[in-house]
């Protein structure tokens, strides 16, 4: 299915994985999906580049502004209120992630959204590991990882027990005391030599989770208000496509690139919203908090 839409992905054997990553332990692997052209980005550089491009096209970007509410009149949005000024607008898009509900309640709207605290660590690789590290989303070992810098790697641990509900305005951004050992143990299940890794630093951030793990995209509440939230840990990579679709919806009444109707907030008021979205949807035991 992925290849049909242009994704360069391949089903490979455990032995093929071992050839790609000689230090890997493959006893628990039945098969792997390998995407040779996939990778990762510098999130700050990517965000700045998109902001710069938007400014070039006439957008105004306000930094260090806290939006405190959405304003409306006679059933239609009229703008937003910030801690500095009021901004008039007849279309408002709420893409505030875990901070969305406090803003939406100012126009009488509440969405089923939970903020989850999620941690990652940066480890120093032992000298015994001297090969390039593949990027893994490893549901068998229960972790994800990628190279971070020269001789360092980033690791996160899967499982709902590592994803706690949190107050977006009052959560600990530091690692729990036991988390570095959990991360080292998790990556060592795939790369045994990583038992000699050293914890350097880490942090905790937030996922914004909906009850079915799918985002909420589209109009809701007063006329002119649109939602784009609930992406868990996967919103960054989908952001440009979702932005294009929502722009199409706002400007012409329908998204052309992808049908957004399944992502409407109203789905949670209908029977069967907990059912899989298709006969190819699957769930896993170590799914990084996406099915709590």
Image (cartoon, rainbow, N blue to C red):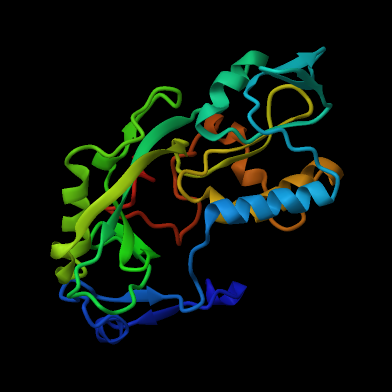
Residue 44 to residue 16: above or below: above
Q: For the C terminus, which image quadrant?
A: top left
Task: Tell me which corner region of the image, top left, top right, bottom left or bottom right, holds residue 131.
Answer: bottom left
Can you give x and y, in whole percent of width and height, for residue 226 in the image? 70, 33
Residue 96 to residue 54: above or below: above
The answer to whether residue 51 is left or right of residue 150 is right
Can you give x and y, in whole percent of width and height, for residue 147 in the image? 37, 66
Going 74% across and 37% down the picture, which residue do you hit? 61
Q: Report if residue 248 is visible in the image.
A: no
The answer to whether residue 264 is left or right of residue 40 is right
Task: Tell me which corner region of the image, top left, top right, bottom left or bottom right, holds residue 216.
Answer: top right
The answer to whether residue 280 is left or right of residue 31 is right
Nearer to the camera, 217 or 180: 180
Nearer to the camera, 266 or 12: 12
Going 60% across and 16% down the picture, which residue do you hit? 105
Nearer to the camera, 85 or 149: 149
Going 27% across and 53% down the picture, which residue do you hit? 286
Can you give x and y, in whole percent of width and height, for residue 155 in the image? 31, 56
Q: Report if residue 139 is visible in the image.
A: yes
Going 84% across and 50% down the picture, which residue do you hit? 57
The answer to whether residue 229 is left or right of residue 117 is right
Task: Tell me which corner region of the image, top left, top right, bottom left or bottom right, holds residue 90.
Answer: top right
């Amino acid at each position: 299915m992925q290849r049909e839409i242009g994704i360069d992905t391949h089903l490979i054997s455990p032995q093929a994985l071992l050839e790609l990553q000689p230090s890997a332990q493959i006893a628990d692997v039945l098969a792997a999906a390998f995407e040779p052209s996939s990778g990762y980005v510098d999130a700050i550089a990517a965000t700045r580049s998109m902001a710069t491009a938007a400014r070039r096209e006439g957008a105004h970007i306000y930094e260090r502004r806290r939006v405190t509410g959405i304003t409306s009149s006679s059933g239609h949005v009229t703008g937003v209120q910030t801690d500095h000024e009021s901004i008039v607008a007849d279309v408002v898009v709420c893409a505030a992630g875990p901070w969305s509900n406090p803003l939406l309640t100012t126009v009488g709207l509440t969405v089923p959204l939970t903020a989850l605290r999620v941690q990652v660590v940066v480890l120093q690789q032992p000298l015994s590991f001297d090969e390039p590290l593949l990027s893994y989303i490893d549901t068998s070992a229960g972790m994800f990882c990628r190279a971070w810098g020269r001789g360092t790697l980033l690791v996160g641990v899967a499982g709902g027990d590592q994803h706690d509900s949190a107050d977006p305005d009052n959560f600990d951004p530091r690692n729990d005391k036991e988390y570095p050992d959990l991360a080292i143990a998790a990556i060592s299940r795939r790369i045994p030599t990583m038992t000699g890794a050293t914890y350097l630093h880490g942090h905790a951030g937030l996922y914004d989770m909906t009850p079915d793990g799918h985002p909420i995209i589209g109009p809701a509440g007063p006329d002119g208000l649109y939602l784009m939230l609930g992406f868990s840990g996967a919103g960054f990579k989908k952001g440009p496509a979702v932005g294009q679709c929502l722009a199409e919806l706002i400007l012409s009444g329908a998204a052309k690139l992808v049908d957004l109707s399944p992502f409407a907030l109203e789905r949670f008021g209908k029977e069967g919203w907990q059912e899989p979205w298709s006969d190819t949807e699957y769930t896993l035991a170590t799914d990084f908090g996406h099915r709590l």
